[in-house]
Amino acid sequence: MKFCPRCGGLMRPAKINGKYYWVCIKCGYREEIKDPKEIEAYRRTLKVTRSPRDKLVVIEGKNNVPVGATLIKGSVRCPRCGSDEVYIWMVQTRSADEPPTRFYRCAKCGYTWREYA
Ligand SMILES: [Zn+2]
Ligand SMILES: [Zn+2]
């Protein structure tokens, strides 16, 4: 287990642009993983402590918008109210070699949903 030096949140390994990083699930802080053994060690602890496979990890930030979320307009529509202003962000919910889950939140009504990348 590794914890974020900035906020104390749990860090998970994630592959970004071909490199492995520890990414804080709370604040998004990143730290490059230089030794792949760290990931193996993390996976071993995961086998024991792993929570239900599809457990939803939602990161709340200011104004109910997750840290690191980007507001996009026109390309995604809210399934509930039809608004095309939507926040998008990624969460590594599973192991590091699987693609991160993409989350969306409607800027208008706050409806949140997700999609596998
Ligand atoms: Zn953090
Ligand atoms: Zn909406």
Image: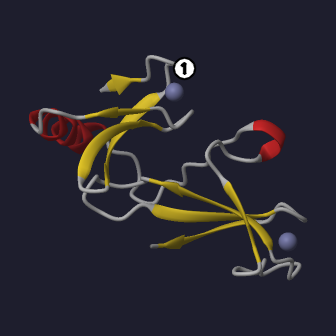
> In the rendered image, which quarter is residue 105 located in?
bottom right
- Camera-side residue of 96 and 84: 84
Identify the element where label 1 is drawn.
loop
Residue 104 relative to residue 94: left or right: right
Q: Looking at the image, which is closer to me, 90 or 73?
A: 73
Residue at image coords 86%, 82%: 82
Position of 54 compared to 107: left or right?
left
* Residue topped by disc 1: 7
User: Residue 72 placed where, x, y %?
Assistant: 72, 68
Q: Who's the residue at 56% across and 33% down the image?
A: 27
Quadrant, the N terminus: top left
Image quarter (top left, top right, bottom left or bottom right) of the C terminus: bottom left
Mark 1 Cα-neighbour bin, 10 Å: few <14, some 14–19, many ≥20: few
**Residue drawn at 26 percent across, 41 percent down:** 46
Could you tell whether 25 is left or right of 87 in the image? left
Q: How is the image coloured?
A: secondary structure
Q: Amino acid at mark 1?
A: Cys
> Where on the picture, by quarter, is residue 7?
top right
- Say above or below: 76 vs 55: below
- Counting from the top left corner in percent of width and height, residue 56 is at 54, 54
Residue 13 vertical placement versus 84 (above, below): above
Q: Confirm or reject: label 1 Cβ below 8 Å from ligand 1.
A: yes
Q: Quadrant of ligand 2?
A: bottom right
The number of numbered discs placed on residues in the rendered structure image is: 1
Residue 107: x, y in percent?
A: 84, 62
Q: Position of residue 68 (x, y in %)?
A: 61, 46
